[in-house]
Image (cartoon, grey):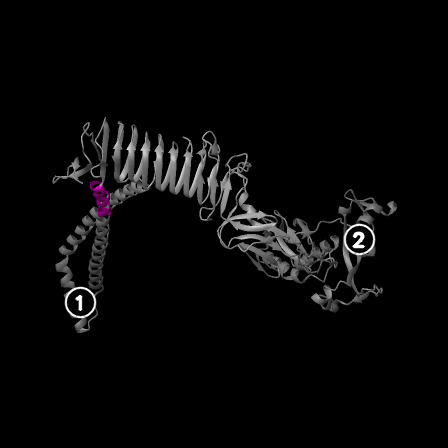
Amino acid sequence: MAEELEEHNNVKVIKPIVVRSENVAKELQKVAKNSDVPVSSLDFSVLEVQTFSKMGSKEGDGADWDELAIDELDQITDDTTLLNPFFELKQIYEIEIFTKVEESVLDTLDISIGANANMTKVFLTIKEGSEINYYDELEHDFFAMVRKRKLRANILVDIFDDVQKDAILAQIARIKVSEHVEYLKKEVLLVAEGLEPAATINDKLILHYEEKSDNEDESGRIDYSKRGYILSVEEDELLIEYIKPREGKPGRDCRGKYIQPLPPETANEPTFTVMASIGLKEDDDKISYYAKKNGYISFENNEYDIATDVQVDEISFKTTGSIDTALNADVSINVKEADILKDAIGMGMDVKVHDIHVDGNMGPNSKVTAEEAKIEGQTHGSSIVTATELKINIHKGSAFGKNIEITRLEHGNVEGDVVKISQATGGVVKAREIYVELLGSHTKLYATEKIVVETLRGSENIFTIDPVLLGSAASKLDENEEKIIESERYLRERREEIKKYETLIEGNKKAYNDVKSRLSNYKKKGIKMPDAFVKKFKQFQKLEVHLSELRGAYQLKESRHKTLNAKASAYQSEITDARVIMKDRWRGHNEIKFMILDPKMELSFVPKENTKAEFIGVMEDEDGDFDIKVLES
């Protein structure tokens, strides 16, 4: 074969070879190997394409291949034929292989042919950086280029090509209009499309309720203290889903091969049973299990149920880990550990539940969040309890809630709406109303409305009445003050503007009435009104309309300003209704403070030793001065 080779620009040139084959790529590789040239140096032209089909049977009767004419190809593209597993297709190509010695004008296009996993969609990718100039034979050459690229990839031609015509013609039209196109990013064209099979679905059992037990933190690290000991659920929540197996549908790829779907696997059929608390819905595709009430999911003896009450000896890293349930899930936990030397809720444990009863103590850095909580033991100084309804025996940590009852406060912090304490020996309490049966020393009580003490046994206590102490009241007051300042500025500026327009209109009123009278006379006599008069009249009208709009806006803002001042006054008025009530005699040094809002000031009062001053409040005199007084009620 070597003697048949010539050289052109240091490239071996073979004599053209005509072959017939079902696989163009293999023929090119074969010629390249036999001629000892790189396959990239070879090109080919398509002389003829023959398409053959045959219809076999289950018995494999060896049907003959029938050649199809070009006009018969449309007859085999219907789904009925192509999805018949016994139908077969093949093509034989007569090509001429030769050495590529001249560059093509299409070489400036960097393109590739690709396909999806099933070979049911074939794509032509024009890569970024490609460029092309328009010329008369571009359409013919472009289609020929795509055809040859398909044959190199062993893709059938003329059968699954319906989608490529519009895609390529759109490119040609674009190039023709622009004359020169540069591709600043890659573009993908669909150039062949077979029949996509429907995927087989294997059965699957999805335990949706377990997704709540995710114990990864924000950085992706696993928190082993959160093990999902209790998984709360809410009414109508989807718990479990069984996806039924479903056989896929066949397809045919762009190489003419029939795609047989795999049989579905069935390995996860439900074997469990469910109680009446769990509902079931079934259709052709799946079985869904959902909660019929709030609670937590229980699985015992291969049976699922929704329960509400849980009893544990302790909540600790070793036993349960932290517990996180929805507050509205109606889950109630009873922690039975009552030994005063042990922690019922261990160090660092975080418990979130609707209702919790703890017979014993809370450990360091532990946290409880609930709608209702009762701690029979004592809280640690670093522990936090948050509950709407909260009862604590001995409190040393931080407590937040609405209605809070504490048997003994020992230097803990409390914030709530109504707080009742049997005995307080140090600590900080903030609430709307505070009631203390026996008050020791070094306790700070802050209230917005009322502080009541039955018996005083200590000193160095501070009683503070502050109407904007709790929640967002302080920020709301600050926001209200800012609005008042802004409103006053707006009203001041509008008053000046209104005065300016009133002066302007008043100064031109005579001229305005004169123009108005003249225009009226012109109109009665049917004489065309001078443009200068009409323009001047409209200018006067615009001034009056603008003044009316300014007055309207001013009145609206003034009304809102009064509302803002009323809100501020409401905050201020609350302090004159507030009371510090001591039902015992005052002993030692204790200080009472009232925080005045307008003007901002702090009033202080120290009751005299051994005096009986039951009701203490603040009064405002006729001059607007405030003072703390001993009152009758």
Q: How many marks?
A: 2
State the extent of the magenta-drawn residues as a range: 564-577
Residue density around tag 2, few if under 14, some if 14–19, many if 20 or more, within 10 Å? many
Question: What type is the residue that disc 2 sits on?
Answer: Ile
Foreground pick, 570 / 283: 283
Query: Which residue occupies 77% across, 53% down?
Result: 44
Q: Quadrant of the C terminus?
A: top left
Query: Which residue occupies 59% across, 52% down?
Result: 181
Residue that sits furthest to the bottom in the current view: 525
Query: Left or right: where does residue 296 sit relative to residue 30?
Result: left
Query: Which image quadrant is residue 587 in?
Result: top left
Q: What is the x, y in percent for residue 162?
A: 67, 63
Q: According to the image, label 2 marks what residue?
A: 97
Residue density around tag 1, few if under 14, some if 14–19, many if 20 or more, within 10 Å? some
Q: Is any atom of residue 312 visible in this view?
A: yes
Q: Which mark is residue 519?
A: 1
Assign a secondary structure to mark 1: helix
Foreground pick, 275 / 631: 275
Q: Is residue 277 above or below residue 357?
A: below
Q: What is the x, y in percent for residue 491?
A: 21, 48
Q: What is the x, y in percent for residue 348?
A: 48, 33
Q: Is residue 425 above or below residue 566?
A: above
